[in-house]
């Protein structure tokens, strides 16, 4: 699971960013005074699931295992996590590397 970090100047800006991400089907997992943790569950591309299921139904049954593996990958590892924070320095004293909104939305809607 990839963790993307967005910077906010204050709690009002954090709420605005979280509202924008909520419109793109991100769900709030945890919220504190200085951060909001959000996640979008990815289930995979419906077209790929349909092709795998039709192939498994008519030709080779082993394709169903490929479909399950693709779903597990999408659900467990490809689902992006977003941390919206007002902090600029991590726990180890190093500055945080921030992502931009376009990168996060591209990852959230990627096929694979």
Image (spheres, helix red, strand yellow):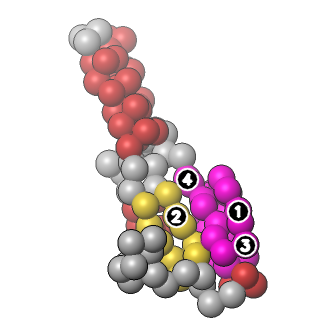
Q: Tell me the crowding category of disc 3: few under 14, some 14 to 19, or many 20 or more residues within 10 angstroms, Cα based.
A: few
Residue at 34% across, 17% down: 64
Give the residue drawn at x 65%, y 53%. Answer: 29
Q: Quadrant of residue 67?
A: top left
Look at the numbered discs 4 and 2 and tell me whether their residues touch, using CB distance below 8 Å: yes
| 60 relative to 70 in the view: left or right | left
State the CA–CA distance, disc 4 to disc 3: 21 Å
Separation (CA) of disc 2 from disc 1: 12 Å
Q: Is residue 8 visible?
A: yes
1 vs 4, front mark: 1
| Tag 3 residue | 33
Instruction: Say above or below: 17 vs 72.
Output: below
Horizontal arrangement in the rendering, residue 34 relative to residue 7 (left or right) = right
Q: Earlier in the sequence, mark 1 or mark 4?
A: 1
Chain part drawn in magenta = 14-40
The local secondary structure at tag 4 comes to loop
Residue 82 numbered mark, or none: 2
* Residue at numbered disc 4: 40
- Distance from disc 4 to disc 2, alpha carbons, whole Å, reads 9 Å
- The reply to whether discs 2 and 3 touch (Cβ–Cβ < 8 Å) is no
Q: Is residue 89 above or below residue 69?
A: below
Instruction: Indicate which label's residue lies in the foreground, 2 or 1.
Output: 1
The residue shown at (34%, 33%) is: 70
Q: Residues within 10 Å of mark 1 (few under 14, many from 20)?
A: few
Quarter where residue 71 is shown: top left
Report the front residue among 47 and 28: 28
Q: Nearer the viewer, mark 4 or mark 3?
A: 3
Measured as percent of width and height from the top left, residue 79 is found at 45, 49
- Checking the image for residue 50, the label placed there is none
- Towards the viewer: 63 or 47: 63
Which residue is denoted by mark 1 in the rendering? 31
Q: Secondary structure at mark 2?
A: strand
């Amino acid at each position: 699971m990839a963790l993307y970090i967005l910077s906010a100047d204050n709690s009002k800006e954090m709420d605005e960013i979280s509202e924008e991400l909520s419109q793109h089907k991100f769900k709030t997992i945890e919220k504190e005074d200085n951060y909001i943790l959000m996640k979008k569950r990815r289930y995979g591309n419906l077209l790929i699931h349909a092709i795998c299921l039709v192939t498994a139904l008519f030709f080779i049954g082993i394709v169903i295992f490929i479909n399950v593996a693709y779903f597990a990958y999408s659900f467990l590892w490809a689902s992006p996590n977003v941390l919206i924070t007002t902090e600029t320095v991590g726990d180890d004293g190093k500055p945080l590397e921030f992502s931009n909104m376009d990168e996060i939305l591209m990852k959230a809607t990627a096929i694979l």
